Image: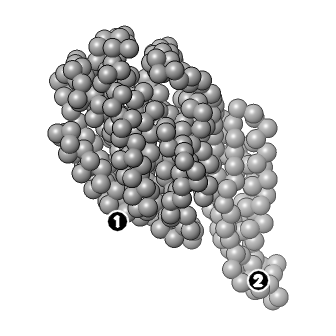
Amino acid sequence: MQYLEHIKWIAQKQPEMLETLIKWAEINSGSQNLPGIRQMQTQIKKLYTNLNVTIHEYAISPYEIINDQGQLIKQTVGDVLCLQQRPEAKYQILLCGHCDTVFDEHHPFQQVTQLDDNTLQGPGVADMKGGLLVMYYALLALEQSPYKDQIGWQVFINADEEIGSLSSSELLPAMVENVDAAFVYEPAMDDTGTLAGTRKGTGNFTICVKGKSAHVGREFSDGRNAIVKLAELITQIHALNQNHDMIVNVGKVLGGDALNRVPDFAMCKINIRTTRMEDEKKFIDSLTNIINQSNQHDFKITIHGKFHRKPKQLDAKTKQLFSFVQAQAAQLELNLPIKATGGCCDGNNLSALGIANVDTLGVRGGHIHTSDEYIKINSLVERAQLSALILMAIASGELDLG
């Protein structure tokens, strides 16, 4: 345990970490709340001034989305914050996080509540403002250690992760050109600390049906009911779930207006989860076939969307990295099992670029994306010490990154 003396002091920082987490959690930074995003980024930059880093902020392109009226619009997202230290060092590590949450400024879940001595409930406390603090204190420990000169690092913090990293992912290829490995600070899979292993890929699609409006009482037979046509399509699309490697979820349906008018517009939004790369083509082919075989007389059917995260598989380098992380955890008497998940994160995107990564090094907690989200408070120190230990061991050459 040659690194222990350089990480044990983190335990003294738990009250400070908790105080900061409460303050951050009560800053609403929903993905579309750009003022809240900027406020969070200001807090993060203020913290990192202690590490004498080079700070870059990147405005990224808006992404395209179909609104509830079936119109293609551009959606602006927050900037990407990048912080860098020693790009010339022997080993180069990327640490990833996000400052957005799923809770918009109108959501009722805005306040933090301490449920007991070791449980804090609040928006984003686990996913992933707690993870951002874990990342920072691990780097703070590294920078105060004698091992820092052998390792360079970049911190990548985006503001659109909760909506799929649709814009920020365009920056990742340039960020990882010289990176040996990456760590992502999503929360652990549960409050015991389980790491996520393989992950499904995902894509979002919108299907719009344009029919013909008519007065129900006078000209019903002249109308073409877009809702009915969409319902026919949805039934066939849902049937694609018979392929157990792929999940197809019709998550939102819109259409219609006045009850005495045949509705001329309807739309649905679909989320797909894939296990294998070839599932993408399988879904596109199946969807195209369903549309082509549909009786489209007097109807116009359009499809918008794409797959934006590839399935994450554990190649040899990634398995080696997991084993390395588990070995460091064992030195802290932590047991970190690995479990496959259908969830996605920026770890998927890193894996698609060929970068070995472990993507659940954030805090222990649970019920993320709900109003019951919570964090186990002692995991702030625990996981910060673990990441600091990992970074120091890499700096000392204990991981073969060739």
Q: Is residue 226 visible?
A: yes
Front-lying residue, 102 or 211: 102
Image side of residue 365 versus residue 265, left or right: left
Decide: is 316 above or below 389: above
Q: Earlier in the sequence, mark 1 or mark 2?
A: 1
Front-lying residue, 397 or 9: 9
Name which residue type carries label 1. Pro
Q: Which corner quadrant holds the C terminus?
A: top left
Where disc 1 sits, the SS reads helix
Decide: is 312 above or below 47: above
Residue occupying image coordinates x 40% and y 38%: 134
Q: Is residue 98 visible?
A: no
Decide: is 122 above or below 323: below
Q: Position of residue 20 (x, y in %)?
A: 37, 52
Number of marks: 2
Task: Kindly report which numbered mark, 1 or 2, lies closer to the viewer in this rendering.
Answer: 1
Image side of residue 372 versus residue 163, left or right: right
Mark 2: few/some/many CA within 10 Å (<14, 14-19, 20+): few
Q: Which corner quadrant holds the N terminus?
A: top left
Where disc 2 sits, the SS reads loop
Rendering quarter of residue 133: top left
Residue occupying image coordinates x 39% and y 46%: 15
Mark 1: few/some/many CA within 10 Å (<14, 14-19, 20+): some
Q: Position of residue 320 (x, y in %)?
A: 47, 14
Name which residue type carries label 2. Leu
Residue occupying image coordinates x 23% and y 29%: 144
Rendering quarter of residue 87: top left
Q: Position of residue 280 (x, y in %)?
A: 60, 36
According to the picture, the residue beneath numbered tag 2 turns out to be 259
Front-lying residue, 316 or 323: 323
Real-space Cα distance between discs 1 and 2? 40 Å
According to the picture, the residue beneath numbered tag 1 turns out to be 35
